[in-house]
Image: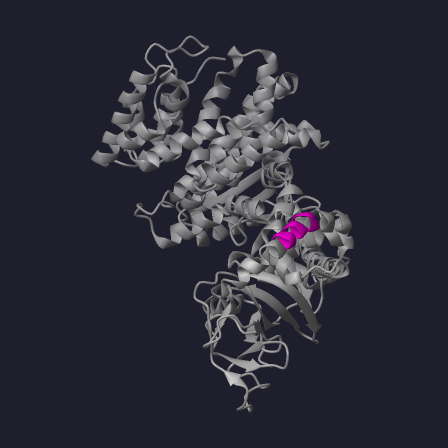
Amino acid sequence: MREQHENITIEDVIEKFRTYNDNKQDIDLIKRAYQYASEKHFGQKRITGDDYITHPLNVALILTDINADSICIAAALLHDTIEDSDSSKEEIEQLFGKDVALLVDGVTKINRLSFTTNDEAVAANQRKILVGLSEDVRVLIIKLADRLHNMRTLYVLSEEKQKRKAKETLEILTPIAHRLGINKIKSELEDLSLRYLNPSAYFDIVEKLNLKKNERDEAVSRMLNEVSDLLNEHNIKHEIKGRSKSIYSIYNKLNKGRRFDDIYDILALRVLVDTEQECYLALGLIHSKYKPVPKRFKDYIAMPKTNLYQSLHTTVFGLDGKFFEIQIRTYEMNEVAEIGIASHWSYKENSDGSKAKKDITEQKLQIFRSIIELNDEMTNSQEFVDSVKNELLTNDVIYVYTPKGDVIELPNGATPIDFAYKVHSEVGDTMIGAIVNDNIVPLNYELKNGDVIKINTNKNSKPSKDWLNFTITTQAKSKIKAYYSKLEKDDNLQKGMDIFEKELRKNNLNINDTLNSKNLDEVLEEEKIKNIEELYIGLATGKYNIQSIIKSLTKPYEKVNILDKINETKMKETPFKNEVLVENMSEIKATLSGCCKPIPNDNIIGYITRGSGISVHRSNCKNIIDIDERLVNVKWNPNINKKFITDIVVYTTTFDNLFDIIAKAKSDDVIIDSINTINKSEYKVYSMSILIENTTKLEKFMQDLLNLDFVNDVQRIVC
């Protein structure tokens, strides 16, 4: 087997490009990219002995077969320059623009991907690259063309490398080509992969096809003429041609127990017409003359595949009783089927395609949005990579429908629960039953191709942990786990807080001082605990020992107390370190009241107590509002920089939101001293004591809480 298009030139590429784009600037970009690549690869040879530049030229030519844009063609010509020469991304961006540089850099990164290891560090890198590649699908299209040309010249490698490359191609790259609808590239990649993975099976099929080639060609020719005459009689303009089944698809059917002579679509025709209406008219005429084979009709026009493939498929008893598979589609549908996303090459903002085409392309890119969604949901990198490989990049799929006729693609073996979570996580969380083809089915029912599924929901329902035993998609499993993880996290957070506070009281430690002192941060760092929330959860689950934590806390804490005692006399000499300054009384003790818990910027007043100095209240505190005697003017010390305790109440609409509130407190640098929950029938109320600097920070924190979707109201407690 020798390399195809071995002696092509840049003129060949440009000539092919001009058949669908004659823009002078675009052609100039391609010429400049070729000149640069030619200089950078000068003197380099492929293993085949050819000049290295023949490879990027062939990749570019393959891309012209699917109407790739000029940026994609230029990037294809440059795709090995960063990896195999002294070029840099920055230099390419300077010479050819940001888009070209991003594509070249993306192809360089994807070349480093390997799906044959279980090493977590490697998986983390794979995850990063996969998510990045999902942002511009043209990187993957260039990679497909790159791999196709390499597969055409795979004969020069050792048998071990041939099989490894072929396996990776079949498992990873052909599913991507399928998802993008690029049948031209997909079919050739599959056939070439089979040729190296199982040469005996490959050549056996080739031999059988060749043995009956003349007989098959004659049968197809006669049937073609008859069908064409039939359509002409009814004035349907058309084009009709014989269609050969790929070797790999025949191999798959033989593997499922089919006999070679029984594979219907070895004898196949494809009819192309102008309009969708003519597709159905042609189908009716063909069925009126040739009896259709039962259960072999598929309407992918009314219900397209998720990669937007559209066509009518029927198998009929043709001439001499032979089975013929006939596909009927419009010219536009055929273009979509053959070159996929490239038929709507308007997915970039600078394209001049219509909005409708952009919408279609967005649907095609669903797989890559799924990768990004999966990245958001999963924490384990190896599981992420395995899920992408086994679920998103697989051809073993079924197509099912919503009651409105929307197509949902799922892995083979999926259940109604997988379907529900594919539709929306809220549908999955609240589902109580499923109806498939108008029949009630159990939730572990295995869906079949073409099923129509309706999900019954109840807003008060919640997912069951038992569902994890029979769901198969990572999306469903991760959503169910996340639901319970969040519930358990909230419960453990509250439990851990109670354990921590109880142990502090037991050891006569002040909760406010402990949470507000740097010794807590030192203990967290020493124990390698990320934050106080993780400590609480760890205490609840037994991960951390409370006595050990308190022991670590009290060592530095006791030292601080000793230092306080040593400096007590000195501190008395500096009354301006008091939080509140009392008018005309520089050394008198002033204590913040526990009833209204004032904080800086609050309007305050002092009350002279009997034997306990000055008690400082908010001016509107109900305990002093009617008192006229024993009041004294006080003011906040502007030089004090610390947090003060106050109370708020948060009214929410759901039961699983505590961690979001804690996260918001953390981001606003607010310390939560304690949280008490009050359960209502349809909502939950949190009573919180917090440590915060002043009313300005408090108002910001309360507003930030109000901005959370599930928060109805936030109020500061006034005694």
Q: Is residue 401 visible?
A: no
Magenta region, main secondary structure: helix
Whether residue 615 is visible? yes
Residue at figure coordinates x 55%, y 47% from the top left: 370
Q: Which of these two is toward me, 487 or 373?
A: 487
Residue depicted at x 35% and y 32%: 101
Find the residue positioned furthest to the top: 49
- Please report the residue visible at 36 percent of the width from the left and 22 percent of the height from the top: 57
Q: Nearer the viewer, residue 709 or 624?
A: 624
The question of residue 557 being in magenta is answered with yes
* Left-right relation of 452 to 233: right
Query: Could you tell me residue 614's position as x and y percent?
Result: 56, 77
Image quarter of the C terminus: bottom right
| Residue 106 vertical placement versus 439 (above, below) | above
Give the image quarter of residue 403. bottom right
Q: Residue 69: give x, y in percent of width and height.
A: 33, 36
Number of numbered discs visible in the structure rendering:
0
Where's residue 315, x and y in %?
60, 42
Q: Is residue 655 above or below residue 94?
A: below
**Residue 412: within the magenta?**
no
Colour style of the rendered protein structure: one colour
Q: Nearer the viewer, residue 677 or 24?
A: 677
**156 above or below 180?**
above
Front position in the image: 391 or 268: 391
Residue at 27% over, 31% down: 94
Above or below residue 485? Residue 83 is: above
Q: Position of residue 20 (x, y in %)?
A: 30, 36
Magenta range:
554-563
